[in-house]
Every structure is written in C-alpha cells, then in structure tokens.
C-alpha cells in the first residue's frame, strides 16, 4: 500500500485556521461550540472564495533540458 499525500492540503489549512479562529471567538463569547462552528464555516467560505494557486508547495520544478 502506497503512502498517499493529502489530495487537498489547502482545504485542511483553511479549516484548521478557521477552527483556531473559532475557538478564540468562542472563548470570548463563552460559547466555544458556536465559535468552532462559525470558524469551520468561515474556513470553508474562505477556501471557496480564494483562487487556487497554480502550484502546490510540494511540486518540484520540472526538468526542461530540451531548450539547450
């Protein structure tokens, strides 16, 4: 069985950041569960509204020796 990389690490980063933001907001409101739900929603919305990058961080630069 091969080790597969996460198919969409950008979504995971957005949701994790949303959860952290939601916990901070929820602690201020004295209702952490609502804060987490709002954070997840904001993370998902941010992911959908921002354009996807052309290349992911893990992509290697392709070797183009034909130009020589």
Image (spheres, rainbow, N blue to C red):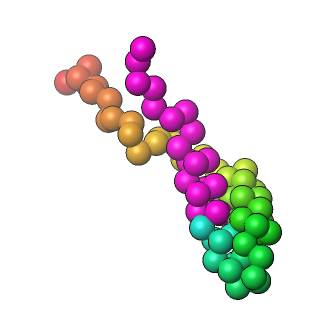
Hey, which residue is sitting farthest top in the picture?
A: 1
Residue displayed at 38% across by 40% down? 58
Horizontally, residue 25 falls left or right of residue 63, namely right
- In the picture, which quadrant includes the C terminus? top left
Residue 47 place in picture, x, y as percent: 67, 53
The magenta stretch spans which residues?
Answer: 1-19
Residue drawn at x 47%, y 41% as measured from the top left: 55
Marks counted in the figure total 0
Camera-nearest residue between 64 and 12 = 12
Where in the figure is residue 26, as x and y percent of width and height?
Answer: 72, 76
Q: Is residue 49 visible?
A: no
Quadrant in the rendering for residue 43: bottom right
7 magenta-colored: yes
Say whether residue 14 is magenta. yes
In the rendering, at what x and y percent does residue 24 appear? 64, 77
Q: As displayed, is residue 33 above or below residue 55?
A: below
Residue at left offset 61%, top offset 47% = 11
Residue at 72 percent across and 72 percent down: it is 32
Instruction: State left or right for residue 9 relative to residue 29.
Output: left
Q: Residue furthest bottom?
A: 28
């Amino acid at each position: 069985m091969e080790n597969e990389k996460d198919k969409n690490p950008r979504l995971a980063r957005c949701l994790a950041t949303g959860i952290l933001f939601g916990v901070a907001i929820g602690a201020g409101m004295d209702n952490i569960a609502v804060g987490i739900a709002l954070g997840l929603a904001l993370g998902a919305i941010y992911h959908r509204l921002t354009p996807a990058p052309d290349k992911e961080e893990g992509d290697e630069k392709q070797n183009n020796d034909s130009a020589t």
